[in-house]
Amino acid sequence: MARKAQIIPPRSDLKRKAVNQTKGVDLTLPPQLVAKLEAVVHRSRDKFVVDITKRLTTIRQACDSVEQNGMTMAEFTREARAESLEIKGAGGTIGYQLISEIGHLMEVFLREKTALSAVQMQVFRLAVDAIFVVLAQRITDDGATLEQQVVESLSVAVRKYR
């Protein structure tokens, strides 16, 4: 039988440190530390780009394998969904917000799917190609008007063919 949870009140000295600005721990980062952290992220950007490119290549090879009956559709959707989640998470970290947005659309498109029709596969391939273009052109942040239109068009296609 499970015991009832016991609530332990915080010690007064910890409470005072947490609330008191003069004796508490300062959680703001000094500008020098922020600059160092940004430098580390920028140096790591190339590694992230290489990683995303490998993931996109894996997805393309899986698409080809499905079309040539080398991989089942269930295996493909499972692998592609996992890779899409990784791409979605990595894009914003390195300043490629468009990659995160397109990765999110890919993940939403594949959510709860075990099979894709030929048209759905083409929509998915377009999303993969769009990320390759973003990487090749080094389009950071949200991109310009054209890039936003591409993402909006992909979003419409995902809603329509999902």
Image (cartoon, rainbow, N blue to C red):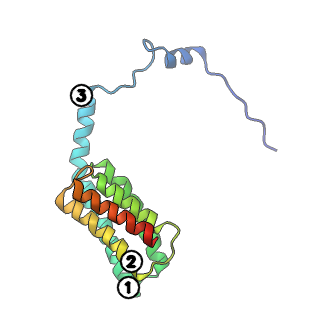
Tell me the residue that label 3 is attached to. 32
Disc 2: which residue: 121
Indicate left or right for 78 with 144 as reference. right
Q: Earlier in the sequence, mark 1 or mark 3?
A: 3
Mark 1 or mark 3: which is in front? 1
Closest to the observer: 50 or 89?
A: 89
Residue at x 82%, y 44% (from the top left corner):
1
**Could you say which is closer to the camera, residue 47 or residue 100?**
100
Residue drawn at point x = 33 percent, y = 71 percent? 58
Please give the count of numbered marks on the rendered protein. Answer: 3
Residue where numbered disc 1 is placed: 67
- The residue under the point 40% across, 62% down is 105
Q: Earlier in the sequence, mark 2 or mark 3?
A: 3
The answer to whether 10 is drawn above or below residue 43 in the figure is above
Give the crowd class for mark 1: few <14, some 14-19, many >=20 residues within 10 Å. some
Disc 3 residue type?
A: Gln
**Mark 2 neighbour class, 10 Å CA radius: few under 14, some 14 to 19, many 20 or more:** some
Q: Is residue 142 left or right of residue 2?
A: left
Measured from the top left, where is residue 142 in percent x and y? Answer: 27, 51
Q: Decide: is 95 above or below 148.
A: above
Q: Earlier in the sequence, mark 1 or mark 2?
A: 1
Which of these two is toward me, 35 or 142? 142
Looking at the picture, tell me which residue is in the foreground, 150 or 74: 150
Give the x, y percent position of residue 63. 36, 78
Residue type, label 1: Glu
